[in-house]
Image (spheres, grey):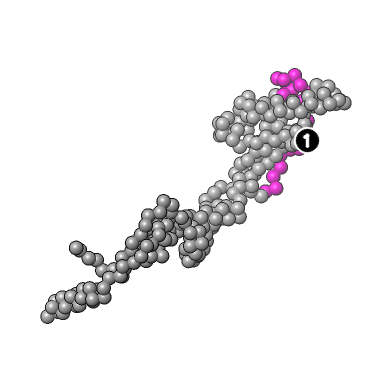
């Protein structure tokens, strides 16, 4: 019978369940804390560099107009509800093709209807009769110009095509000069977290798939098996094999 050099032979009884020792897993992760910290720093640095040097800053400008109903005064809940419903209707009109294509023509923009629509965001604060038109662009001056023109064209379109009182523009587009995107601090934090998560995931996967058995304790921890006993090899056998290897080495030197 062939024999291999080993310290002990392990006899085990099979168990149906394999349990993961969470404490042991935590200690395994903790033992690689330097790698986890390095991955966190690397992820944060990469995210910072991408946000700072590769991503184009985006600016926003917001114009507002106030929606009026056909009656000149609003004195009842029905009139207020009518104004609110009109605001919802106007949100559809403002980002519609006739209005945006007219804006493109008026400003001679090198954009399509779809590309301009992606830059426009509409908002009706707290179900009021105020409609906010926000435009995002890499040029803050252009964002303001587009927002103002959309408001102006929308007011004229509503008055002419919908037989309603023209909304009143209460605020022209503005920009404080600060980019709204990218958020460098937020992206850096996310990059660091992703880097750390990736490092931990690699450690966990390596731990789960490491099925190397070194001793009886590993059998219980990694396989969930019950050890019935151990059969150590005789020292004479092990020493004899070592002596044989030594003799062979001496012969080669000669």
Above or below residue 174? Residue 91 is above
Q: Quadrant of residue 69?
A: top right
Horizontal arrangement in the rendering, residue 200 relative to residue 86 (left or right):
left
Residue at 56% in and 47% down: 56
Image location of residue 112, percent across then percent down: 55, 31
Residue 81, position as x, y percentages in the image: 79, 26
The magenta-colored residue range is 158-177
Using residue 52 as the reference point, say whether residue 131 is left or right of it. Answer: right
Check disc 1 and report the residue beneath it: 170
Residue 53 seen from this side: no
Q: Residue at x 14, y 76 (%)?
A: 252
Residues 134 and 186: in front is 186
* Above or below, comparing residue 123 to residue 13 in the picture: above
Q: Residue at x 61, y 26 (%)?
A: 97
Tell me the quadrant of the picture where the C terminus can be found. Answer: bottom left
Q: Nearer the viewer, residue 156 or 85?
A: 85
The secondary element bearing badge 1 is classed as strand
Could you tell me if residue 143 is visible in this image? yes
Specify whether residue 24 is painted magenta.
no
Image quadrant in which the N terminus is located? bottom left
């Amino acid at each position: 019978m062939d024999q291999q050099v080993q310290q002990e032979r392990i006899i085990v009884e099979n168990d149906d369940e394999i349990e993961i020792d969470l404490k042991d897993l935590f200690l395994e992760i903790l033992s690689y804390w330097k790698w986890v910290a390095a991955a966190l720093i690397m992820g944060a640095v990469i995210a910072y560099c991408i946000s700072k040097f590769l991503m184009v800053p985006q600016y926003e400008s917001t114009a507002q107009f106030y929606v009026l109903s056909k009656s000149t005064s609003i004195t009842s809940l029905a009139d207020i509800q009518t104004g609110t419903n009109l605001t919802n209707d106007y949100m559809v009109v403002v980002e519609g093709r006739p209005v945006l294509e007219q804006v493109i023509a008026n400003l001679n923009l090198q954009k399509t209807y779809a590309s301009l629509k992606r830059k426009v965001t509409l908002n009706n604060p707290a179900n009021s009769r105020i409609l906010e038109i926000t435009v995002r662009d890499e040029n803050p001056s252009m964002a303001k110009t587009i927002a103002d023109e959309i408001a102006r064209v929308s007011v004229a379109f509503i008055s002419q095509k919908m037989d309603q009182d023209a909304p009143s523009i209460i605020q022209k587009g503005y920009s404080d000069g600060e980019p709204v995107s990218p958020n460098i601090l937020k992206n850096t934090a996310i990059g660091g977290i992703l880097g750390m998560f990736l490092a931990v995931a690699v450690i966990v996967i390596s731990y789960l798939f490491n099925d190397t058995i070194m001793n009886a304790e590993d059998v219980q921890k990694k396989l969930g098996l019950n050890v019935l006993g151990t059969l150590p090899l005789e020292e004479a056998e092990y020493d004899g094999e070592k002596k044989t290897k030594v003799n062979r080495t001496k012969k080669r030197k000669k």
